[in-house]
Image (cartoon, rainbow, N blue to C red):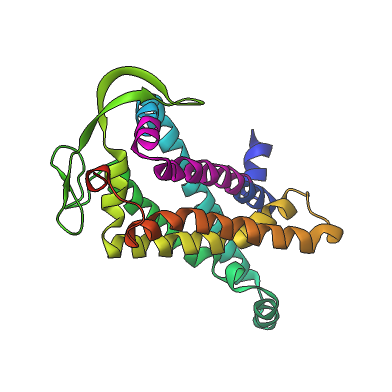
Amino acid sequence: MKAFLSYCTSSIGRKTAVALTGLGLMLFVVGHMVGNLQVFLGPDWINAYAHKLQTLGPLLWVIRLGLLAIVGLHILATLSMVLENRKARPARYAVDAHKASTAASRSMAISGTILLCFIIFHLLHFTVRAVPGHGYNEAPILMADGTALPAHVTLDKHWGLKLEEIDPIQAHNTHGMMIAGFSYWYISAFYVLGMFLLSMHLSHGAASFLQTLGLRNEALKDAIAVGAKVFAWALFAGFVSIPASVMLGLLKPVALLH
């Protein structure tokens, strides 16, 4: 146990922690994007998907708290390494390293901190639904133009490999909540900023974790760097397509489609 704790607090241990937690978060982000993009398939898909997650009950909160713990560990380990490197780094070396690094790598700590603020807001907005004026629980859901949408809808389809008919039940109007939320320009702007910082973070981190885990070599260095950038900005495009479509009027709630 003592040897394990010593490894965890060592430089290589913290680098490994950053790499493994980063990998876990990248997998979650991909899954989260795929889930969110179901909003383009219509209200039945996204509402059934969200209701399926809610049926997990306490397990869903265990998963959420676990993800928050991973985020916290990732940030703490990253900040710890940044502070340690700054203390140990001579001034001349710092100048040379700054020239050799990228904007993404130099801003990892800052972008990570801002991302934490975004994650907290995002959870308060869409998960806890505690942002003033954006409760989405009992009162009608209000879009930026004042249009009122029901907080709950009748759900008659079950989410799985395909939608299957079920006895009608009352479920949360996730489709309306997402569209109403992004109808406010400042929320969409903050979301785009958060996704930009996430993608910039990933454009460096997706390649770095392979190096830390010993899975990258010089022959593949350039290809992996390009692949990391493509991966990061593809995620950006996927996530941002939702608020962009809402702001452009391409994605509308059911109430406005009839």
Q: x and y percent of residue 34 in the render? A: 50, 42
The answer to whether any part of residue 68 appears in the image is no
- Judging depth in this view, the residue of 251 and 98 nearest the camera is 251
- Judging depth in this view, the residue of 156 and 18 nearest the camera is 156
| 52 relative to 7 in the view: left or right | left
Q: Is residue 40 magenta?
A: yes
* Vertical comparison of 192 with 75: above or below: below
Residue with the most extreme top position: 167
Q: x and y percent of residue 221 in the render? A: 79, 61
- Judging depth in this view, the residue of 141 and 224 nearest the camera is 141
Query: Residue drawn at (36%, 24%), measured in percent from left and top?
Result: 157
Highlighted magenta segment, given as a residue range: 20-49
Magenta segment main secondary structure: helix
Q: How many marks?
A: 0
Give the quarter of the image for residue 39: top left
Q: Is residue 232 magenta?
A: no
Give the quarter of the image for residue 224: bottom right
Q: Quadrant of the N terminus?
A: top right
- Judging depth in this view, the residue of 43 and 127 nearest the camera is 43
Q: x and y percent of residue 195 in the render? A: 46, 59
Q: x and y percent of residue 179 in the render? A: 30, 50
| 206 relative to 178 in the view: left or right | right
Query: Residue drawn at (48%, 64%), measured in percent from left and top?
Result: 196
* Vertical comparison of 172 with 179: above or below: above
The answer to whether any part of residue 1 appears in the image is yes
Give the quarter of the image for residue 98: bottom right
Q: Quadrant of the C terminus?
A: top left
Residue with the most extreme front position: 258
Query: Residue drawn at (64%, 82%), measured in percent from left and top?
Result: 91
